[in-house]
């Protein structure tokens, strides 16, 4: 298991926008999932199927940023559209929905498996030189 603690500087690997920030909270996956209304988290479920049995980490990015990437947002909208038999937005509508519908966040949640210490990230980058 990841030995990430409150106060550590971490970076995300595969979910959300690239993020570097300080860990400000840690909660059990099931608690987070229930807190969010037991909704599907497609990207998390696909990449980390056991995330609900693990920990979710709240990260405060260096600057406020959107909590999800455009691709993740689009996937979640398409899932809801399909589930509710609604019409599918076109590309322009998706861009407007993302721009105005996803606010900037001061804290972003990540499955703990998606995070690594920033120092380790930098070290892995420099090993390729």
Image: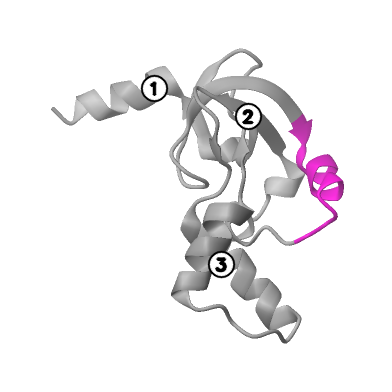
In this rendered view, identify the residue nearer to me: 91 or 129: 91
Give yes or no for residue 37 being in the magenta stretch: yes
Q: Do the residues labelled 1 and 3 touch (CB within 8 Å)?
A: no
Residue bearing the label numbered 1? 120
SS of the residue at dot 3?
helix
| Left-right relation of 59 to 52 | left
What is the distance, in whole Å, between disc 1 and disc 3 at their CAs? Answer: 30 Å
Residue 60 location, quadrant:
top right
Task: Name the residue furthest left.
Answer: 129
Q: Give the range drawn in magenta.
A: 27-39
Q: Residue at x 56, y 78 (%)?
A: 89
In this rendered view, identify the residue nearer to me: 68 or 54: 68
Q: Which quadrant does the C terminus fall into? A: top left
Circle on res. 106? 2
Q: Position of residue 67 (x, y in %)?
A: 58, 43
Q: Which quadrant does the N terminus fall into? A: top right
Number of residues whose C-alpha sits closer than 10 Å to that of mark 1, classed few (under 14), some (14–19) or many (20 or more): few
Please identify, in this view, whether the residue under mark 1 or under mark 3 is nearer the observer. Answer: 3
Q: Where is residue 66 in the image (x, y as percent from the top left)?
A: 55, 42
Task: Name the residue furthest top.
Answer: 7
Question: Mark 2 vs mark 3: which is more N-terminal?
Answer: 3
Q: Position of residue 4 (x, y in %)?
A: 60, 22
Q: Which residue is drawn at 60% across and 74% down?
A: 78
Number of residues whose C-alpha sits closer than 10 Å to that of mark 2, classed few (under 14), some (14–19) or many (20 or more): some
Q: Where is residue 43 in the image (x, y as percent from the top left)?
A: 57, 58
Circle on res. 75? 3
Q: Residue at x 64, y 85 (%)?
A: 87
Q: Are marks 2 and 1 in contact (CB under 8 Å)?
A: no
Give yes or no for residue 108 being in the magenta stretch: no
Residue 47 visible in image:
no
What is the distance, in whole Å, between disc 2 and disc 3 at their CAs? Answer: 23 Å
Residue 77 location, quadrant:
bottom right
């Amino acid at each position: 298991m990841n030995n990430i603690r409150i106060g550590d500087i971490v970076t995300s690997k595969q979910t959300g926008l690239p993020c570097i920030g300080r860990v400000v909270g840690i909660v059990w996956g099931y608690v987070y999932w229930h807190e969010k209304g037991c909704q599907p988290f497609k990207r998390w479920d696909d990449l980390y199927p056991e995330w609900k049995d693990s920990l979710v980490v709240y990260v405060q990015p260096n600057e406020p940023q959107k909590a999800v990437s455009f691709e993740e947002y689009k996937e979640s909208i398409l899932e809801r559209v399909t589930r509710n038999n609604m019409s599918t937005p076109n590309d322009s509508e998706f861009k407007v929905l993302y721009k105005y519908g996803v606010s900037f966040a001061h804290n972003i949640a990540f499955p703990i498996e998606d995070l690594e210490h920033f120092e380790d990230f930098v070290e892995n980058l420099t090993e390729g030189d």
